Image (tube, rainbow, N blue to C red):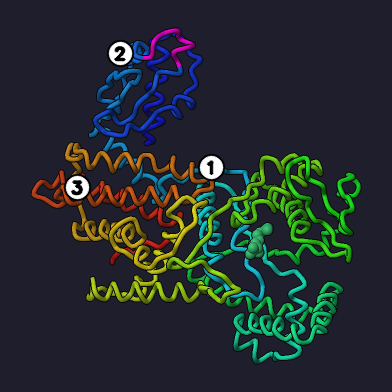
């Protein structure tokens, strides 16, 4: 029951009848339907201005002419206001049809198979080896994970890729440091923290004894040449990092289909270089081989250094080709901070110059803003780092303290605190459009009122509790009890939710979903305060309970799509 679609169909029929022609396009009509700012102005409005030219008629006249032909059980009346035709829904009919539709959707409102046969590669999280998982990698993880769920929900095949940062001279240095000051026990026990300390120590000591740098280079060369010892140590570093990251991924319920990172492409570099050469794209510049991008207003893209080493961009070009060949994607998304905007524009352009037309339309950098913590910018160099596992642990503790205070008698408090605490962090990250910078603040993330994760989860739990209290309902619902404006507002939000999910995919913007469920929660609470759900009138109660049930379902779907859990009690 998509109100936009139903109204556009009615509009199409009316237009065709009024003007005795059929070349109107119903999908275009659907898109042009607007949601009036005030419900008094109609539940949906059709602006007639764009038709005025082809029909050679003033917009109000067009509206008038269409109005007399509108006939649909969903529409109770229409009204002409200026150049607009305003539609008013038959509230009772709408309520009944909506409830039937959502309850008939098998607990997955807005799910579809429109993406069937298409594959979306999503490069997200993409952490770096030997570095602890910090808050700077929260957004890529949360946005990417949510997009994966959204595309899955719409029937696409998705491939989640953790493009590990596991290549570079720094790993040679780390091995050198490990050989001097480390031991298997030390890194086993200390984990990634121990690894990053080794790295810091390397830099300090290298200031005194510059020969360390040569050692680092030598070790990196050994990794490159596939030396057994070097690889064994390096792979151990990798394992330690992933074990540490897995703890975060477990808490967030995030997973990947591939961990093919930068080093995975070692044996796929030759093809890139060869192809670039054959296509006459490589030029020598200051000793390095680059692709000149001046005519596109970009600095040259570095491909090969004088010592034969390849670069981040070379690996991304190889990765794109590999993904295309392997997965035949119809879209390849890179959920990476906006600071890498130039990098991706260069990579996409080089692919295009290589003749890969798909690079123009199928590659997308899904950029996001910076995150700061309690008003402070984060900087690895100044030691101002917020580790993600610690942040998530703290979120659970804080949530538990709040729950202990608010609902001391609740069962499973620990479990709920985990859902609420972790959820509050995800929600906070996914509430604003992704390109905006965010400042993470506890008092705002964990606030139970306002536009927060706990608020939406609380509303979900409230729906569940209302339904639990009501128990089994065997009276047939009287939908005329849903004739009020609070019910209507809720029904409209739920009706438009599938469209919101599609838009979220089209724009790669999970925040659309976050906002939609926040609006639903607000609308439900309004409804809850204005109406007695359980009353003497059993048929009216049944209708309000049915409405509660579909709000519950839609919020649960939305929470799932942004990667949050739905606690049935709070
Ligand atoms: N590891 C990189 C970083 O932490 C992000 C990699 C993004 N993905 C890619 N294909 N370049 O900044």
Q: Disc 1 to disc 3, how far (Cα)? A: 37 Å
How far apart marks 1 and 2 lie (CA) works out to 36 Å
Indicate the quadrant of ligand 1 in the picture.
Answer: bottom right
Label 1 secondary element: helix
Q: Residues within 10 Å of mark 1 (few under 14, many from 20)?
A: few
Q: Position of residue 260 (x, y in %)?
A: 70, 64
Looking at the rendering, which quadrant does residue 272 occupy? bottom right
Pick the residue in front: 305 or 408: 305
| Residue 542 - label | 3
Residue designated by label 1: 506
Residue nearest the observer in this picture, 98 or 377: 377
Q: Earlier in the sequence, mark 1 or mark 2?
A: 2
Q: Residue furthest left?
A: 536
Q: Is the residue 501 above or below the residue 87 in the image?
A: below
Q: Which residues are magenta?
A: 51-59
For the stretch drawn in magenta, the main secondary structure is helix
Of the 4 image quadrants, the one containing the N terminus is top left
- Residue 224 appears left or right of 564: right
Q: Residues within 10 Å of mark 3 (few under 14, many from 20)?
A: many
Nearer the observer: mark 1 or 2; the answer is 1
In the rendering, which numbered label is found on residue 111? Answer: none
Question: Assess mark 1: CB under 8 A from ligand 1?
Answer: no
Q: Is residue 258 among the parts visible in the rendering?
A: no
Tell me how many marks there are: 3
Answer whether labels 1 and 2 touch (C-beta < 8 Å). Answer: no
Going from N to C along the chain, the mark reached first, 3 or 2, is 2
């Amino acid at each position: 029951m998509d109100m936009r679609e139903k109204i556009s169909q009615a509009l199409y029929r009316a237009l065709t009848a009024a003007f005795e022609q059929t070349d109107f396009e119903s999908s275009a009509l659907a898109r042009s339907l607007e949601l009036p700012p005030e419900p008094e102005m109609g539940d949906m409005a059709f602006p007639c201005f764009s038709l005025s030219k082809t029909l050679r008629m003033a917009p109000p006249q067009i509206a008038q002419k269409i109005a007399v032909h509108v006939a649909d059980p969903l529409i109770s009346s229409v009204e002409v206001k200026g150049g607009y035709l305003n539609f008013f829904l038959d509230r009772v009919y709408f309520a009944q049809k909506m409830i039937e539709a959502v309850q008939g959707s098998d607990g997955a409102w807005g799910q579809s198979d429109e993406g069937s046969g298409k594959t979306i590669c999503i490069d997200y999280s993409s952490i770096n080896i030997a570095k602890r998982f910090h808050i700077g990698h929260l957004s890529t993880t949360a946005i990417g994970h949510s997009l994966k769920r959204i595309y899955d929900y719409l029937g696409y095949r998705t491939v989640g890729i953790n493009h590990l940062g596991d290549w570079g001279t720094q790993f040679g240095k780390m091995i050198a440091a490990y050989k001097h000051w480390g031991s298997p026990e030390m890194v086993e026990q200390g984990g990634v923290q121990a690894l990053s300390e080794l790295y810091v120590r390397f830099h300090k000591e290298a200031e005194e004894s510059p020969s360390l740098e040569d050692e680092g280079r030598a070790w990196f060369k050994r990794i490159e040449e596939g030396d057994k010892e070097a690889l064994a140590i390096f792979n151990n570093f990798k394992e330690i990092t992933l074990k540490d990251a897995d703890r975060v991924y477990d808490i967030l319920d995030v997973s990947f289909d591939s961990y093919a990172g930068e080093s995975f492409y070692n044996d796929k570099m030759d093809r890139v270089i060869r192809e670039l050469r054959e296509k006459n794209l490589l030029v020598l510049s200051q000793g390095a081989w680059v692709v000149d991008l001046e005519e596109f207003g970009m600095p040259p893209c570095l491909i090969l250094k004088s010592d034969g080493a390849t670069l981040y961009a070379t690996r991304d070009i190889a990765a794109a080709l590999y993904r295309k060949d392997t997965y035949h994607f119809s879209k390849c998304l890179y959920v990476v901070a906006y600071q890498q905007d130039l990098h991706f524009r260069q990579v996409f352009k080089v692919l295009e110059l290589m003749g890969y037309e798909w690079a123009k339309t199928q590659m997308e950098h899904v950029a996001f803003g910076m995150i700061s913590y309690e008003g402070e910018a984060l900087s690895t160099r100044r030691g101002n780092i917020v580790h993600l596992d610690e942040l998530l642990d703290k979120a659970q503790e804080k949530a538990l303290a709040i729950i202990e205070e608010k609902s001391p008698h609740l069962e499973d408090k620990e479990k709920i605190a985990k859902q609420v605490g972790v959820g509050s962090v995800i929600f906070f990250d996914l509430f604003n459009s992704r390109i905006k910078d965010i400042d993470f603040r506890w008092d705002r993330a964990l606030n139970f009122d306002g536009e927060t994760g706990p608020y939406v989860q609380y509303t979900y739990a409230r729906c569940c509790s209302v339904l639990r209290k009501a128990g089994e309902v065997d009276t047939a619902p009287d939908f005329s009890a849903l004739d009020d404006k609070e019910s209507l507002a809720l029904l409209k939000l739920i009706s438009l939710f599938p469209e919101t999910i599609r838009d979220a995919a089209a724009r790669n913007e999970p925040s659309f979903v976050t906002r939609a469920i926040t609006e639903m929660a607000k609308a439900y609470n309004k409804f809850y305060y204005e109406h007695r759900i359980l009353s003497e009138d059993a048929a009216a109660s049944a209708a309000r309970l049915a409405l509660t049930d579909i709000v519950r379902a839609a919020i649960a779907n939305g929470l799932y799509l942004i990667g949050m859990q739905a606690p049935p009690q709070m």
